[in-house]
Image (cartoon, rainbow, N blue to C red):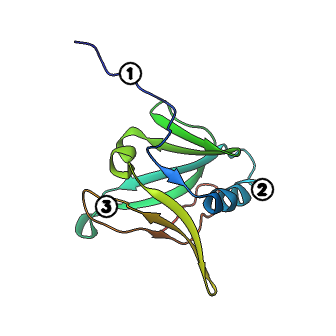
């Protein structure tokens, strides 16, 4: 029996819109030592699963990476199992702007909106 080989590069497992890439690049360009953005999923008790984004200095050995126009998005294997098929967009409605995760938790229920990424080590709500 052969083991499945770990693929550290993402292709179509997640999709990030051009506008979301532009906004994430703008957020990361002024942060020293930032290698990219991590998308994470955490258990949420009564509220179910929740997700977030944070700046990272380097990927871990368990991360897969999606790249476009110099932006690196890191997702660990466990989070990817919940986020496969997600579409990340950036939308502006009036004075409100947010990252929107479409098709998030498609198999387990849930929804996705995210205000904005904070400083290094910070996250999205």
At horizontal 77% and vertical 56% (from top left) the residue drawn is 30
Alpha carbon distance from label 3 to label 2: 31 Å
Q: Quadrant of residue 112?
A: bottom left
Tell me if I can see residue 119 in this picture. Answer: no
Element marked by disc 1: loop
90 or 34, which is in the foreground? 90
70 sits to left or right of 43: right
Alpha carbon distance from label 1 to label 2: 36 Å
60 sits to left or right of 70: left
Mark 3 is surrounded, within 10 Å at the Cα level, by few (under 14), some (14 to 19) or many (20 or more) other residues, namely some
Mark 2 is surrounded, within 10 Å at the Cα level, by few (under 14), some (14 to 19) or many (20 or more) other residues, namely few
Q: Earlier in the sequence, mark 1 or mark 2?
A: 1
Mark 1 is surrounded, within 10 Å at the Cα level, by few (under 14), some (14 to 19) or many (20 or more) other residues, namely few
Q: Residue furthest top?
A: 1
The N terminus - image quarter: top left
Element marked by disc 3: loop
Residue 39, position as x, y percentages in the image = 49, 52
**Mark 3 sits on what residue?**
49
User: Which of labels 3 and 1 is toward the front?
Assistant: 1
**Mark 1 sits on what residue?**
5
67 or 42, which is in the foreground? 67
Alpha carbon distance from label 3 to label 1: 28 Å
Residue 65, position as x, y percentages in the image = 54, 38
User: Is 27 placed above or below 91 here?
Assistant: above
Q: Residue furthest bottom?
A: 94
User: Which of labels 1 and 2 is toward the front?
Assistant: 1
């Amino acid at each position: 029996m052969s083991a499945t080989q770990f693929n550290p590069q993402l292709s179509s497992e997640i999709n990030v819109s051009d506008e979301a890439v532009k906004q994430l690049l703008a957020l990361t360009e002024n942060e020293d030592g930032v290698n990219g953005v991590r998308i994470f999923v955490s258990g949420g008790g009564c509220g179910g699963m929740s997700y977030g984004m944070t700046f990272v200095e380097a990927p871990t050995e368990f991360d897969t990476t999606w790249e476009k126009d110099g932006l690196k998005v890191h997702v660990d294997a466990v989070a990817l199992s919940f986020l496969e098929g997600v579409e990340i967009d950036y939308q502006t409605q009036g004075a409100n702007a947010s990252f929107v995760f479409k098709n998030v938790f498609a198999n387990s229920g849930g929804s996705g909106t995210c205000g904005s990424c904070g400083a290094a080590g910070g996250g999205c709500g």
